[in-house]
Amino acid sequence: MGSYAMTKISSKHITYTDKVSLYHSDSGFVVREGEKFHNVDPMLLDADLKKIDSKNLNSFLASTLIRVIKLNSGEFALRSHVNGLGGGPLTGMLAAWCIRAAMYVPAAVATTGAIAITGPAGAAAAAGATPGYIATTEGAAAAAAIAGYACWFLP
């Protein structure tokens, strides 16, 4: 490991399924797995982690988790994950209604214009296209609602 000073990163700041310890020094990151120490290749760090030094480590960890990934080769890769709350149910509902408004209003204007210009033929064409359009719009609105709601629970 060398004679340089290493800082152990608290387990509350790392995510990994097995028992590992993560250390940092100005020379880089080191993962301890059991009694083995593995230097993490700088090529296996994400861009944010490459910028970390001893001076900014604590401020970085205040809002970020480090995900430790063991590769098939036995090497370890590190990825950062910024913690934050998603929008929740209200944002999901708002997103769904924004999608509906963005899709239904122009469709209603276009349909009204087509019926006004063409008469009964436009009405028949609009009636035939409406079920598919409604299904697409409601599907997009449901996806927006689910995404907004799910983000509330993501770390």
Image: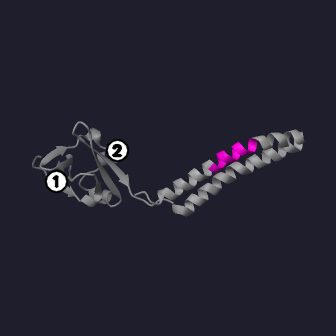
**Residue displayed at 67% across by 53% down:** 100
Q: Is residue 79 left or right of residue 137?
A: left
In this view, the residue farthest toward the top is 73
* Picture disc at residue 21: none
Secondary structure mostly taken by the magenta-highlighted segment of the chain: helix
* Contact check, label 1 and label 2, Cβ < 8 Å: no
Q: Which residue range is magenta in the image?
A: 129-138
Q: How is the image coloured?
A: one colour
Foreground of the two, 51 or 12: 12
Based on the picture, tell me whether residue 8 belongs to the magenta stretch.
no
Give coordinates of residue 41: x percent, y percent: 23, 40
Res 57 → quadrant: bottom left
Please, is residue 83 above or below residue 48 in the view? below
Foreground of the two, 154 or 22: 154
Give coordinates of residue 129: x percent, y percent: 75, 41
Based on the picture, tell me whether residue 135 belongs to the magenta stretch.
yes
Residue at mark 2: 47
Residue at mark 1: 6
- Mark 1: give few (<14), some (14-19) or many (20+) Cα within 10 Å: some
Give coordinates of residue 66: x percent, y percent: 30, 52
Looking at the rendered structure, the kind of residue marked 2 is Ala
Q: Element at badge 2?
A: helix
- Mark 2: give few (<14), some (14-19) or many (20+) Cα within 10 Å: few
**Residue displayed at 77% across by 41% down:** 128
